[in-house]
Amino acid sequence: MTRVVKTQVEQEGRIVEEKVVVDGPELEPWPPDAALEVVGRPVSRVDAVERVTGRAVYTHDAHPQGMLYGKVLRCPFAHARIKRVDASRALLLPGVRAVLTHQNAPPIQWIDGLQLLDTVARYQGYEVAAVAAEDRQAAEDALKLINVEYEELPFVTDPEKALQPDAPQLHPEGNLVGGRSRVYERGNMQQGWAEADLAVEESFHTQAALQNPLEPHGSVAMWEGDSLTLWDSTQHVYAVQFGLAGMLGLPLHHVRVICQYMGGGFGSKQELEKQSLLAALLARMAGRPVKIMLDRADESLVAGHRHPTIQHLRIGARKDGTLVTVELKALVPVGAHGSDSIVEGPVKELYLCPNVRTEVSTVRTNEGPAKAFRAPGYVEGSFALESAMDMLAERLGIDPLELRLKNYADMDQVRGKEYSAKNLRQAYTEAAEKIGWASRPHNGSSAAADFPFITRKRGIGMASQIWGGGGGPPAYAVVKVNADGTAEVMLGGQDIGSGTRTGMAQIAAETLGFPLDQVRVLLGDSQAGFYAPASAGSRSISSLGPAVRSAAEDARRQLLDIAAQMLDVAADQVELKNGHAYTRSAPDQRRSVSELLAAFSNPMVVGKGSRGPNPPDRALRTFGVQFVEVEVDVDTGHIRVLHVVAMHDCGRIINPRLVQSQFEGGITQGVGYALTEERVVDPQTGRVLNPGLEEYLVPTSMDIPEINASALGLPDPHSNNLGAKGVGEPPIIPTAPAIANAVYNATGIRLTTLPMSARQFLQRRSAP
Amino acid sequence: MTRVVKTQVEQEGRIVEEKVVVDGPELEPWPPDAALEVVGRPVSRVDAVERVTGRAVYTHDAHPQGMLYGKVLRCPFAHARIKRVDASRALLLPGVRAVLTHQNAPPIQWIDGLQLLDTVARYQGYEVAAVAAEDRQAAEDALKLINVEYEELPFVTDPEKALQPDAPQLHPEGNLVGGRSRVYERGNMQQGWAEADLAVEESFHTQAALQNPLEPHGSVAMWEGDSLTLWDSTQHVYAVQFGLAGMLGLPLHHVRVICQYMGGGFGSKQELEKQSLLAALLARMAGRPVKIMLDRADESLVAGHRHPTIQHLRIGARKDGTLVTVELKALVPVGAHGSDSIVEGPVKELYLCPNVRTEVSTVRTNEGPAKAFRAPGYVEGSFALESAMDMLAERLGIDPLELRLKNYADMDQVRGKEYSAKNLRQAYTEAAEKIGWASRPHNGSSAAADFPFITRKRGIGMASQIWGGGGGPPAYAVVKVNADGTAEVMLGGQDIGSGTRTGMAQIAAETLGFPLDQVRVLLGDSQAGFYAPASAGSRSISSLGPAVRSAAEDARRQLLDIAAQMLDVAADQVELKNGHAYTRSAPDQRRSVSELLAAFSNPMVVGKGSRGPNPPDRALRTFGVQFVEVEVDVDTGHIRVLHVVAMHDCGRIINPRLVQSQFEGGITQGVGYALTEERVVDPQTGRVLNPGLEEYLVPTSMDIPEINASALGLPDPHSNNLGAKGVGEPPIIPTAPAIANAVYNATGIRLTTLPMSARQFLQRRSAP
């Protein structure tokens, strides 16, 4: 049954080839018209009570006996040499148990060949020392007693300046990551431009937005001999396990990472974090467990942010609206050590276009690392592309929706493959009707609202979305059925907060034919579970879900075998439903699973399964569209989003209520991204000016529009054995450009910089 | 692969028919001459450092946040009606959080239709109330503030008196358990006695001996909503899980039982104990975790003891020594609610004899429950049988060993089956040679030792043993192989202290072809693991071991598949050894498992397996013999055991060092059982006179003889896929009768009552 297969897996907007090991039953998806009992029902979260009563153990709640509190001393400068660290006074403070500085840290290479605690700090918030003490206050006091002598160095935070030859250099290869820009080209650009009847060209600027998970990053580290247990607020317990094992030279079976509950991550918690390693080292020094949780200011400085971008976009089209060429040049600063971002994804994929060129320069700057943030790259890229599409539509005098339908891509042009499923056309139609697209005002023609002396204008805009979410191997699951007919699903993955326990329980219950409450999902423990992917890339449902179905199917087949032998019929004559085995020939011969198993002495049925390979000849993508109605106060520049109609195409829906949460969360985050959120760095000092939720403005309940979001719910026949795809990221993608297009529709003013602040609106209004 | 099979399983000396579910690879045992790399090596315990440094978490060490301390108020009388319980003052004591009495306990039937906290206490130590408080002292103080009004009732502790019609009755059916004696008969007794040339007849008395595990019984209970976690010092996490689920009406997937380390149980910790349920109820009342650990006095009163017996034995033989008939009548008191004991086992099984009759009366008395204790029944029964065999040998003028060989049973006469393997003859020969049996003194002829004024006599005695230890299903295991070539063996079972982690790691490492330190065994958690049998019946190796081999084999086959595909050869051309895959055709094409798996993105290989069925046509038994040299001070009556030579036949040895521990532990406990251990109940009051280790005398290091013990190490071709059988219990069986026979050999005095105290010796010496 074991197979080594080559497959393609979606990773942050990128499709990568992988070899994986597949084991366990491989299944066809349920037929689209299958009468499912549990899957598809909007059941409440199975762990809702734990969460709302505070019983759920988050990393913050982990408290092994003897635990110390750790704190990190951070560099206040954007770039500095650490000349001297004197921790001697800190060590004298009562309650202080360990201090770690570059002088006593073990030689561990963290990134780019730099030491874990390096003597050059490349961004504000850089870790200079760490302390473990009996209580939080002692740890904080100790930080103040550590004497650090810094030599301030020149810094750069502007990506354009960072590429100039005289800029401070953050890396031996220079500030351009990889030493050159990343270029993609298809077709013939010269010919494309020759064929174009007209072009639009615009520069777009997007900001650094913070993931701001409700629960900050942090860890509790505990050693037992040469084995390490780490409670970590992480989207990927196995990545942290691998990271710790690698950095500390431990074998994997001596590293256990636990994340039973978490308060979000939005992409910023996918890997081993430096504070986790510092906690592990302090715990080893002190011989006691150590907890380090970041505070909100730390989160703002070092825990990640969405990549800012400068995108210069040119689109060439025929008079009839047919795209002939698209060209993108983008500058993406990633901070001192961030990973890159696929800002060019939408331009390459979203519309049919024969000639495309993208050139992305990833630039190092003196800031904390940029990290993945809900549909990374595609959010930024879609803002530019979908804004430009509306500009083109207006130039052409074509309805923006019509322009998009005109350039509808029926296949994946980057990979030359058919889509496994694409129902975006249906999504357009349904959502347009809901918002009343046909009767929207002409651009800029909106009448002022009827409030005297205040000029509020309303408009409607739209934008569409492409993203992955098809997931892929590897992912493994084990399902055990107890003697009383209850089942436990054993996973190694974690629940980022999206309801993984619930979705997986539904899949297992459906497959086994058990009532939902007879199924419990165990997850969040690398040791007690089995390899599972990150809770990222919209792939919990699409990667882990199929493994759960495979394992449950393995258990189900065993139950059918047993039932068949006990009822003395062929196995294919038995069915499992609602916790009972039936024979097809005599449906009254009903036996509950617990009755079946009660005939044995304490048996257990153990099923295992894995995520099968992706189809080699199909591209797995999700699609969607959002229509937005806004009201703009043209005198104050204040933009209010009134109403969002979203329609997404993400395959079979396992639980509509969980999907609704993602819609609401994604759209809300999209509104914040569009209108208010921005981490501001002072160009004079390189310091973050708003490291906290008082000055960094996430939407409050008062800012959230009426959200009318749905999914088409059409199973994808090729995606996996569920027909499902992920929907965690897609809803944030089209929100900002749809708002920008709605603002234009209302006011005739095109905003090309995020966030779309009142100030920007007013500046543009008064611009010539 | 799933099969429902009928099989026979050994349970405390009894063979029972079971239906079980079998899944996973079924394997032949390794050939006897297989060159094994890890199995058979005397490696140190893999968890030795945890244990000796105190890092291992026993139940005593479990301390969930907010934990309260529970204490139990116990009845001081052997039989009493509880007329009134007033806990009002206890509840006023600061720190007291919950008090449970029969007035507020939920209606839970504990045993024999009686309530959990019944209003009639049937033995000293009976649970009357339970308290949970912030610390131990508050809990103890609270007990003193609970006012109980008792009405003392007549009691009976003597089993003969308990069967008299006027005895206090402990049960509606009377004091004879089941209402009648248990009778076994084969052949024709009348004809047997007619054929006998002579007979020996004797009454034997054996005492109540305490299991006295180093770690007492106890639990920590913690509720999370409607889910219960119990840390319990138990030999069977699943029995406790089943018990709790049944008593509390919980589904199995909401009950988790944890026992990561334990300090012994010796049979007394196989089920849900009352204090565990009390802890769970108190925890639910208080809304906080509760720990209840028994103290040593509680252990002596209520935690179990080996069944005392009165055995009347008659053996009829021909002049040439051929047994023709054996007849046993036994009286076995079990306390108020104890389980019965197979005292007749040895008489039925050990020797070839056509006519056998046993009649065992199990009697209720006003004492705490008797419980299984290392080879229950067989220890008591063998004392009588093996003493009587020596008496017969002397009457016949035959060498005792010769008499045993004369009546050697080549097949199981009870079940009419061949033994899977029996090499007792070889064990006799080898051990007899080691002790110098041929040159032992004639009975009673021993010269006094050469110390002046003190008359010490030396003698040699022997006894043999039969027992189960073949184990059987159900038992399940999962083995996961990590990307770096390390492996984790996931079991639900527990390690009673015999080294289960080590033995299972060796089996997995051998099967996988991995070095031992690349394998870690996870056990002791019903939730994180898979059904495993009790650490009892000498079946950890023989039940769980084969499941581990099966699961590891499933993983190994997958690794071979992967290696074959990567090396581009057929799977049967690849071998795994020492963590590397080789191709047979090109042995230099060596790849480590981690190299193999490094080619993948984070894969994992998951294998599962189960214990296969026992062979239907074979009886699985273990055998052994012990020869003992003693020195008796005939003036003081003091008996000293000088030397024990043991030779046991228990199949393939997985780890000789672990086996040696069982030999030394069993023989030491046998010496205590033979000479000093006895729980004494005052016939006047029904109270235990020596509830503590100062007055209940277990052997100290000074009492332990030179032990020269070995196992034959001949794999059993039919027992299971390891060829192994258990050896936890067998070593205690022959020790006491071998000592009795040695004492007789030295002094000519036959001791028929245990323990063989100096007082008894002197009484016998001065008897006519």
Image (cartoon, coloured by chain):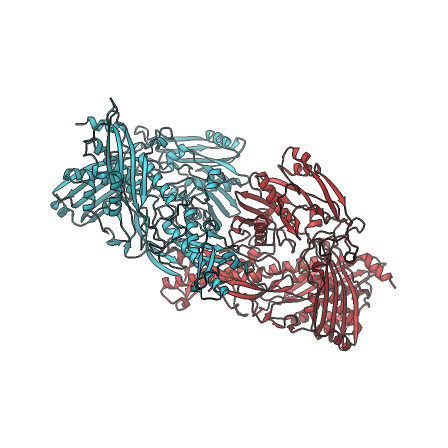
Chain colours: A cyan, B red
Q: Is residue B255 above or below residue A568?
A: above
All told, the count of numbered labels is 0
Quadrant (top left/top right/bottom left/bottom right) for the N terminus of chain A: bottom left
Displayed quadrant of residue A234: top left
Q: Is residue A289 left or right of residue A677?
A: right
Q: Is residue B331 left or right of residue A127?
A: right
Residue found farthest to the right: B768
From the top left corner, tell me how far across and down residue B181 is, in percent: 72, 63
Examine the rendering and report whether any part of residue A162 can be seen: no
Q: Is residue A640 above or below residue B462?
A: above
Displayed quadrant of residue A210: top left
From the top left corner, tell me how far across and down residue B430 is, in percent: 67, 70
Q: Is residue B289 left or right of residue A60?
A: right
Quadrant (top left/top right/bottom left/bottom right) for the C terminus of chain A: top left
Q: Is residue B350 above or below residue A297?
A: below
From the top left corner, tell me how far across and down residue B604 is, in percent: 42, 55
Q: Nearer the viewer, residue B273 or B470?
A: B273
Examine the rendering and report whether any part of residue A657 can be seen: yes
From the top left corner, tell me how far across and down residue B628 is, in percent: 73, 64
Q: Is residue A500 above or below residue B453?
A: above
Q: Nearer the viewer, residue B152 or B685?
A: B152
